[in-house]
Image (spheres, helix red, strand yellow):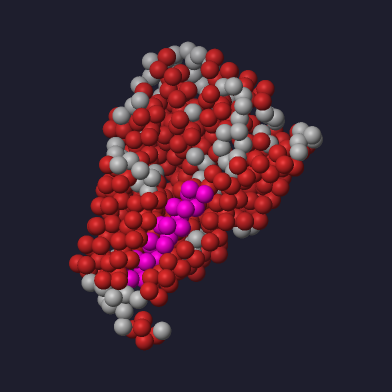
Amino acid sequence: MMENEVKEPKVGLTEGIIVLLFMLLIMGFSVIKLGISPQIPILLVILLLIAWAKVRRFSWNSVNQGIIDGISTGIIPMFIFILIGALISSWIAAGVIPSLMVYGFHLISAEWFLPSVFLVCTIVGTAIGSAFTVVSTIGIAFLGMGLTMGINPAMIAGAVISGAIFGDKTSPLSDSTNLASAVVGADLFSHIRNLMWSTIPAFFTSLIVFFLIGRTNAHLNTASIDKTINVLNQHFSISLWAFLPIVLMFLCAWRKIPAIPTLFINITVAVGMIFVQAPTTKVQEIVNILTNGFVSHSGNKNVDNLLTRGGITSMMATIALIISALALGGLLMKFGVIDAVMGPLSRKLQSDGSMILAVVLSGIGVNIFVGEQYLSVILPGNAFKSTFDKAKLAPVALSRALEDGGTVINYLIPWGVAGVFAANTLQVPTIDYLPFAIFSLSSPIFSIISGFTGIGLKHLKTHENV
């Protein structure tokens, strides 16, 4: 086997660039032009990559080992995704997420409408871990309220999207946050804690800007909010006790308890709360909720759209994407394509700051050329992982840069998946709300500042203290 490995062909810089550009062309055309989800394009790229590898006389052992090496790094994160699906549905059934929504709505202020919208969207986004869901539910409600007050719709959209992305980025329930930590092999909660070095400054920057531009003397019509609150109170158990799992989540993170036991603890507590609130609930009903997700039957379309979600099965599409993407990354590493392309660049990256800058710009570049937020994390993540290891930078340093240059930027790209979704949902063109998506604009800036100043930049020797 060692002899076969020695005889494996070498990939040059030009050939490596051609392979990567061909991949980006296929995936970009599939996602942007055809509008299809990235799973099948990734599988097609893997097929063509293997065909190219056989033409170049790579062995089947290299093909198999590349797939195994790539996927093996994601085994634990994929199991975490399964638990997150169960956690989301159990939190909804136990009234955790509905309670967060109710208390969040009370923060809405007519005089300070934009900062209120931003804050509520951060709370709900953190609770449910989905920016798309926040934008398509309460985001639409806030847009309607703001329009009746004569507020610029682009400003409203910017506040909604900024808050939704903050929640998505910092929530342990977020698929993009889990993906970023999975790609680099970082612990989920260590990744989230390290995100704060760029996320908190971006949060306060956004809040200050919205305070400066968002004061109004208009009267707020709270009818739609009151209606939603009434629906939630009628169909869910709303109380301060619902914050118990949230407190447990933060306690576990503070005690540095790993993600898997933390999620198991929270699922168990949430299931216990369900039985306390409704002692007649059957075990079969709980199993169905954990497996297939919670289904809301409140009769209110917006509430039902927001709270019909979760379950183990809801994570299968994301897990399929992760398996395919990690397999692709493993093959690219095994065939030496990544090393061939990144080698010359990495030799020129002499400082920590230049490496962070390169990752952020790479994520932005993938967003611009491909328009897919997952790939903006996966491709640069696989490309720079070995470079960061050689520089003794901790995995959380790379995962934070991936989020700051990848997932948050996709909402600013008019042809990006998230940008198209937000523009179509809120009926506000991406280019119009872009100047007001303050959180997305400022996150990469603070990430780059952290890289060059060293503030909050974690190295391998201090990784255990993250």
User: In this view of the protein, can residue 172 be seen by the observer?
Assistant: yes
Report whether 49 appears left or right of 271.
Answer: left
SS majority, magenta: helix
Q: Quarter of the image containing the N terminus?
A: bottom left
User: In this view of the protein, can residue 389 be seen by the observer?
Assistant: no
335 is within the stretch colored magenta: yes
Question: Which residue occupies 57% across, 22% down?
Answer: 300
336 is within the stretch colored magenta: yes
Q: Nearer the viewer, residue 434 or 83?
A: 83
Q: What count of labels does the image hold?
A: 0
Question: Which residue occupies 39% across, 29% down?
Answer: 425
Question: Which residue occupies 48% across, 58% down?
Answer: 182
Residue 49: % across, % down:
31, 63
Question: Which residue occupies 33% across, 66% down?
Answer: 50
| Part of the protein shown in magenta | 316-338
> Measured along the vertical axis of the image, is residue 32 above or below residue 221?
below
Residue 286: % across, % down:
70, 41
